[in-house]
Amino acid sequence: MVSMFSRRTDWRLTPNRFTEAVQEVRASGRQILDLTVSNPTRAGIEYDGPAILDSFRNLKSLDYDPQPKGSRSAREAVADYYRERGEQIDPEHLVLTTSTSEGYSYVFRLLANPADEVLVPKPSYPLFDFLAELQDVKLVGYPLLYDHGWQIDWPSLESGVSDKTRGLVVVHPNNPTGSYVSAGERERLSELCRKRGLALIADEVFLDYAHDGSRRRSFVINNGALTFTLSGISKISAMPQMKLAWIAVSGREPDVDAAVQRLEVVADTYLSLNAPIQLAARTLLEQRKKIQPQLMQRVCANVAELDRQLAGQKSSARLDVEGGWYAVLRVPATQSDEDLAIALLRNTGTMVHPGHFYDFPRDGYLVISLIAAEEEFREGILRLLKFLGQ
């Protein structure tokens, strides 16, 4: 029988074994210590509610003034965010979107014909697979190798470039490894993209969350190759519900102008951003100055607690992490990561993510969130390590 649905949506829609286990434990009424929490609005962070809500009380919201790239005032607010970081971006080179996922879809549509290829790092966030399938793009992975820190596997990356390759994704810092792209890697990536006629796509949603407090350089000022930098207030201001993100285009002027013109047509086709969120953009971005310190205090406290507990045993270790909200544990590979995560959940009520969710190449890795409430994090790690030591 011929399906009425497209092949691009031919996903396996039944829950995986891990999800079934989570549902089973919750149905039993047992409390779960969630060390996978990614929603900052439910992580005990204090928001300035009155200031945020008041920013939406604007009569201009009643006027329909469609601007494909987003309103000038909102784009200027984004440009000012970068200016305060010491980086300059022309507001005319910004295209606002509702999310970085939408930003990816715009860029994939801009660059790739059906069956064209985009290089993506592995391990990395699993959402790439769905975004690529929906845009008829084929993903080709290139490994990140770990040796006292993460680095790009250059021979694998370069051998992965084909006549169908249109773009190369970097995540800065990577999720979940927490590794930033080094200055040397940035130069080499730009050179590769320039020589092979590729676009560089930089995902920077966790850029501001460097664990050592040292500001990392954004790709918005990268001119060595045509570069699309994606970010938004989901992580910058810890407001995923507010749906404001952007694409910043940089590189050689002729390439930038052509890319922005085409992106403007793509954005004009959907006009997905609403007026209230654009009018509130400056206020929402300013909120990062109150929210980021809270999150960094939480992250640093949890890393310190994790290291303290790890020091009392020898079977597991934390891999180096430079930024972001996650940490990777290397654990004994006595079973699959999924089996381990399920056993941990059922026996201790502690939830972590198995490494294979993020395309780790082998078993022996668990991924944990660093923004969980400190007491829950402390107890969850205690249970995790006790279970591993049995």
Image (tube, rainbow, N blue to C red):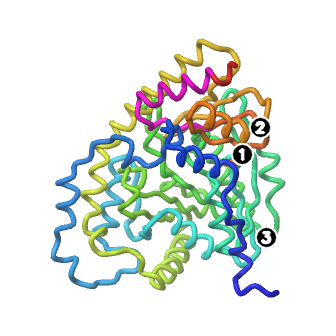
The picture quadrant where one finds residue 165 is: bottom right
Residue behind mark 2: 363
Number of the front mark, 2 or 3: 2
Q: Secondary structure at mark 3?
A: loop
Q: x and y percent of residue 46 in the render?
A: 27, 42
The residue depicted at 76 percent of the width and 59 percent of the height is 140
Residue behind mark 1: 356
- Are there few (<14), some (14-19), or many (20+) residues within 10 Å of tag 2? some
Q: Nearer the viewer, residue 14 or 366?
A: 14
Precedes in sequence: disc 1 or disc 2: 1
Q: x and y percent of residue 31 in the render?
A: 48, 38
Q: Would you say the residues marked 2 and 3 are in contact, meaning their CB atoms lie under 8 Å apart?
A: no
The kind of residue tagged 2 is: Asp
Q: Is residue 379 above or below residue 257?
A: above
- Are there few (<14), some (14-19), or many (20+) residues within 10 Å of tag 1? some
Q: x and y percent of residue 78 in the render?
A: 35, 60
Task: Decide whether residue 305 is among the magenta residues.
Answer: no
Q: Which mark is residue 164?
A: 3
Q: Would you say the residues marked 1 and 2 are in contact, meaning their CB atoms lie under 8 Å apart?
A: yes
Please give left or right for residue 269 compared with residue 138 in the image.
left
Q: Secondary structure at mark 1?
A: helix
Precedes in sequence: disc 3 or disc 1: 3
Precedes in sequence: disc 2 or disc 3: 3
Q: x and y percent of residue 364 in the render?
A: 74, 33
Magenta-drawn segment: 367-386
The kind of residue tagged 3 is: Lys
Task: Decide whether residue 378 is among the magenta residues.
Answer: yes
Q: Would you say the residues marked 3 and 1 are in contact, meaning their CB atoms lie under 8 Å apart?
A: no
